């Protein structure tokens, strides 16, 4: 049994200096996931705002690459990082009671923030899932690695079945929604309050849809992050780390080839078996991307940019939703019908550049982003009786 199998997560001896160098790749991974989320979310906002037409081969190529490289790939990376970070937090140099209180506060705050985000800005919010499923992960933190690995396999297979089972539909379970032309009309011409009302009316449906399509994969990748931290797979170069990385490359390469061919030919939509495999390869592609991005010490301009974004990922994620709604919806600039895939790419590049500049400027004087700072202060705040004892 490993150290994690015992009570909470005890302290380890200080790792070698190389471990801290390799850990810097986590911010690059977080920044990469943020860019992928932005690519997907901007397309969703544009469609909600009026379904931009894909009228030429260049736009069609961009749409295919977006589907293959980013759609469904970014949120499992965030889930992996969430599990990894939770394990790190539980190894803090404070009492077990304080560690547990901080985890509970963080999960509650993230879930509450997710509800607000889903109602006010983005109908496919993912933060609520991290807040809810994080409690499951915390409850399973003492399980042996072999047990967690079996649970991981079960979650992946169950998630692929759930996402491809035709009889699973939120509307069958009493979740109504406003969709199609009426919903688009609200996004195009409605006020802020009408859009919020639409999100509120559809909130149960949207959450149910995410539970069926994403939550098993999110929990599976949280467990993967827990295992990775437990065995220092992203920190030290060991035989286990090297074998795991080679396996991830093989899985990721096959998954990328499958998804590229499937997106071009659409063959995976003809049979449920191929659709099931395609759903699994989305997760496989994510695993390969994690191994590839974290393989070496971050160097170069691209790594620096992604690091700046990753250190303020929550702030930048929420900021992207504010920017996209303002650009695409009728109560803002109403550009949804005009944001073709190629124009989305141009706009996205400028916004990312602005976020990189803002992140660099903010982090020059602060240790956390604005939202991360507020969240950290609230999580670390001691109850009054504990504060008095500390003094």
Image (cartoon, grey):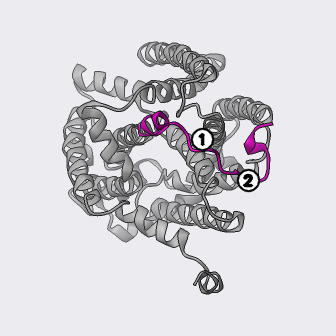
Relative to 58, is 293 on the left or the right? Answer: right
Q: Which of the 4 image quarters holds residue 362?
A: bottom left
* Above or below, comparing residue 354 to residue 72 in the picture: below
**Which residue in the structure is indicated by mark 2?**
8
Give the alpha-carbon distance from disc 2 to disc 1, as whole Å.
28 Å
The quadrant in which the N terminus is found is: top right
- Is residue 5 rendered magenta in the image? yes
Q: Which of the 4 image quarters holds residue 128?
A: bottom right
Towards the viewer: 168 or 151: 151
* Above or below, comparing residue 83 to residue 375 in the picture: above
Relative to 254, is 99 on the left or the right? Answer: right
The quadrant in which the C terminus is found is: bottom right
Q: Residue at x 38, y 44 (%)?
A: 41
Q: Position of residue 207 (x, y in %)?
A: 59, 53
**Which residue in the structure is indicated by mark 1?**
214
| Residue 195 seen in the current view | no
User: Pointer 1: residues within 10 angstroms few (<14), some, or many (20+)?
Assistant: many
Q: Which of the 4 image quarters holds residue 327?
A: bottom left
Q: Residue at x 55, y 52 (%)?
A: 206
Q: Position of residue 15 (x, y in %)?
A: 55, 39
Towards the viewer: 17 or 39: 17
Mark 2 near mark 1, Cβ–Cβ under 8 Å? no
Disc 1, SS: loop
Q: Residue at x 42, y 24 (%)?
A: 68
* Above or below, comparing residue 337 to residue 312 in the picture: above
Magenta residues (range): 1-24
Towards the viewer: 133 or 313: 313
Q: Residue at x 38, y 71 (%)?
A: 193
Q: Which mark is residue 238?
A: none
Q: Position of residue 375 (x, y in %)?
A: 47, 66
């Amino acid at each position: 049994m490993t150290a994690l199998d015992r009570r909470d997560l005890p302290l380890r001896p200080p790792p070698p200096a190389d471990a801290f160098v390799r850990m810097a790749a986590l911010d690059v991974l977080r920044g990469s996931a943020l860019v992928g989320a932005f690519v997907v979310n901007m397309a969703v906002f544009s469609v909600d705002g009026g379904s931009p037409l894909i009228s030429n081969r260049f736009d069609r190529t961009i749409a295919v690459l977006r589907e293959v490289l980013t759609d469904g790939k970014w949120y499992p990376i965030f889930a992996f990082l969430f599990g990894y970070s939770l394990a790190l937090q539980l190894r803090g140099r404070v009492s077990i009671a304080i560690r547990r209180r901080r985890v509970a506060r963080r999960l509650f705050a993230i879930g509450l923030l997710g509800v607000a985000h889903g109602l006010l800005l983005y109908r496919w919010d993912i933060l609520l899932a991290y807040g809810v499923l994080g409690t499951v992960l915390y409850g399973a933190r003492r399980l042996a690695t072999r047990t967690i690995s079996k649970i991981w396999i079960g979650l992946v297979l169950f998630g692929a079945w759930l996402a491809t089972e035709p009889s699973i539909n939120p509307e069958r379970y009493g979740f109504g929604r406003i969709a199609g032309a009426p919903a688009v009309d609200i996004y195009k011409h409605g006020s802020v309050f009408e859009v919020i009302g639409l999100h509120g009316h559809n909130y149960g449906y949207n959450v149910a849809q995410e539970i069926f399509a994403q939550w098993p994969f999110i929990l599976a990748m949280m467990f993967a992050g827990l295992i990775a931290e437990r065995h220092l797979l992203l920190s030290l170069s060991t035989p286990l780390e090297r074998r795991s990385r080679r396996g991830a490359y093989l899985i990721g390469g096959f998954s990328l080839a499958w998804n590229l061919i499937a997106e071009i030919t659409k063959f995976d939509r003809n049979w449920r078996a191929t659709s099931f495999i395609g759903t699994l390869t989305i997760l496989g592609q994510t695993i390969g991307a994690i191994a590839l991005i974290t393989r070496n010490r971050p160097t170069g301009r691209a790594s620096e940019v992604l690091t700046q974004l990753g250190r303020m990922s929550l702030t930048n994620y929420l900021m992207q939703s504010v920017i996209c709604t303002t650009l695409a919806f009728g109560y803002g600039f109403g550009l949804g019908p005009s944001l073709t895939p190629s124009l989305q790419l141009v706009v996205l590049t400028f916004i990312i550049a602005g976020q990189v500049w803002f992140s660099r400027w903010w982090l020059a004087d602060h240790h956390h982003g604005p939202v991360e700072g507020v969240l950290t202060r609230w999580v670390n705040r001691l109850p009054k009786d504990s504060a008095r004892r500390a003094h």
